[in-house]
Amino acid sequence: MIGATGQTGRVAVRALAEDGWEVRAASRGGGRDERWPRDVRAVRLDREDDAALAAVIGDGCDVVVDMVAFGRTHARQLTGLAGRIGSAVVISSGSVYEDDRGRGFDTQDEPDGGPRYPVPIPETQRTVAPGEATYSTRKALLERELLAAGGALPVTLLRAGAVHGPYSRTPRELYFVKRLLDGRRRRVLAYGGRSRFHPVHVGNLAELIRLAAARPGSRVLNAADPGAPTVAEIGAAIDRVLDRETETVLLDGAPVDGVGDTPWTLEHPVIYDMVAAERELGYRPVTDYADSLPGTVDWLTERLRGRDWTDAFPKMVQNYGRDGLFDYAAEDAWLARYDRTAG
């Protein structure tokens, strides 16, 4: 397992070990999760070091699970070891998809750039042009290079949705949890609160990894939860977990100067088809969004205890800016105007 101590890796290591696999858990720090079985072997690895990766593989292994692969270099690292690897399971992303007019995640900030995907999105939907420019294009390049290996290295590529669960560096649920902890009792949601960005819990992603490891093959599969709640439903579910009441004010259209925007906010739904995973792997989800939410919220509240959110989640600051998620002054000003108009 490459990237074993990340959000999904730590759950997948445990799932594989409990399924009877002998697991070498590789990460940059070489750490281990306290919930792993004792026979899991934690090893230190800089995955950019080809020789170090080859040393971890050793004389060979049945499966490599790669949580952190991007682009051509990482793909060729794996294919270069094909004679010593039985098969691979590699995490890709649903962001590789583009709609029939060439719009995708990379065009969302452009005029009329929001993609309009089929509902649900099958694995046969077209993808962005591969390249090294963005997260999405690097994942597309990774996929192309690995699939080109053909029978030399059977690879299951899992196109993950919006990953959620504890230990995330960029937890979307922070948007609602922090507001409630800060005593906010009103929120604004754009597009009528109808935005749907299909999530996948780390437990479900780990289950897909477990099943794919046991059934080698060359394939691309979506990875998502059994349902795709709207952003309004997510906010209401977090209210229930924290036993709070919040008034939701709905904007009919796009966010206004950032007000109404959330990490799930999209004009058009993004929902992944899971039929192929069910057919090819016998996949059955181990949880759904609502049932898994208390664990995520508990972890978030503990992580925030006595800390500024910018210290607890620096990657969120990098992605959204210091005021991008929690500009309460702008939100209050908009709500004041809304109240005057509504009155």
Image (cartoon, rainbow, N blue to C red):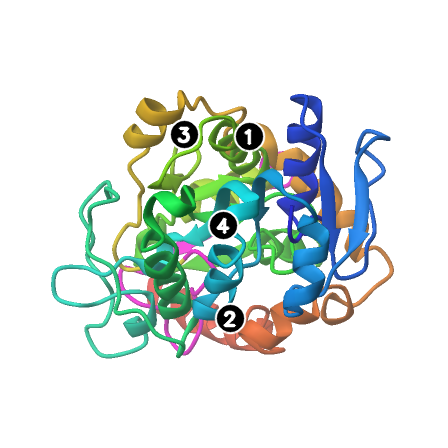
Neighbours of disc 2 within 10 Å: few (<14), some (14-19), many (20+): some
Is the Cβ of the residue at disc 2 closer than 8 Å to that at disc 4?
no
Amino acid bearing label 3: Pro
Query: Residue 226: which numbered mark, if any?
Result: 3
Q: Nearer the viewer, mark 2 or mark 4?
A: 4
Neighbours of disc 1 within 10 Å: few (<14), some (14-19), many (20+): many
Query: Residue 166: which numbered mark, if any?
Result: none
Q: Nearer the viewer, mark 4 or mark 3?
A: 4
Q: On the image, numbered disc 1 is attached to which residue?
A: 210
Q: Earlier in the sequence, mark 4 or mark 3?
A: 4
Q: On the image, numbered disc 4 is attached to which residue?
A: 82
Real-space Cα separation, disc 3 to disc 2, in angstroms: 33 Å
Q: Secondary structure at mark 2?
A: helix
Q: Earlier in the sequence, mark 3 or mark 2?
A: 3
* Residue 25 drawn at (x, y percent): 73, 45
Real-space Cα separation, disc 2 to disc 4, in angstroms: 54 Å
